[in-house]
Image: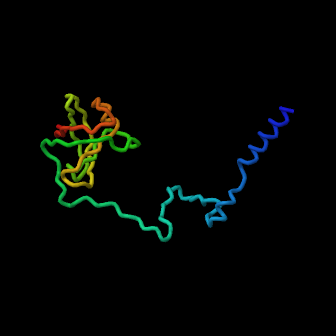
Amino acid sequence: MRMTVFSLASISLLAACNSPQLNSQILGGQASVPVQETGQSPVLEPAPGVEVAEAAPLAPDAPSFSGSATTVASLGDPSVPGMWMETPLVATEQQALVRSDRNTQVLVTLKPLAAGASGGSRLSIGAMRALGLPLTEVVELQVLPAG
């Protein structure tokens, strides 16, 4: 008896895996998404009636980093790999040396960040680990030329 119940339950679960999704047709959606044959990634467009805010462009008079500066940094997007720091100190990507108050330093790529000149920076998780900094704190960093 137990084996019969187990067999019927597993068969019904397997049969439910390929069942059509009726709710998508009821809500006006498509039952299946067409696959592009060009090999390009699909372009996402907003739904009709939805307003999308444009990203704020960098100010044309954003300062170019040279010399040394001090900034306050927190953890940036942990899903973006690499050794980088998003900062309002630069207008274009460039290399720099970042030093912590623990006297550890690491070479990072400075990426422009659309914020005010007094805005803070965002440091990659790899750079924070290399500097030995806690991931949950805001830290003060010294930014120096790469050479």
Q: Residue at x 29, y 37 (%)?
A: 137
In the picture, residue 141 is in which quadrant? Answer: top left
Name the one closer to the observer, 51 or 65. 51
Residue 86 placement, left or right of 25: left
Place of residue 126 in the rendered image (x, y in percent of width and height, measured from the top left): 34, 35
Q: Residue furthest left?
A: 67
Q: Residue furthest right?
A: 1
129 in relation to 143, above or below: above
Residue 91 placement, left or right of 83: left
Place of residue 69 in the rendered image (x, y in percent of width and height, measured from the top left): 15, 43
Name the one closer to the observer, 106 or 101. 101
77 in relation to 115, above or below: above
Q: Residue at x 59, y 58 (%)?
A: 35
Is the N terminus in the top left, top right, bottom left or bottom right quadrant?
Answer: top right
Place of residue 133 in the rendered image (x, y in percent of width and height, measured from the top left): 29, 32
Q: Residue at x 19, y 51 (%)?
A: 118
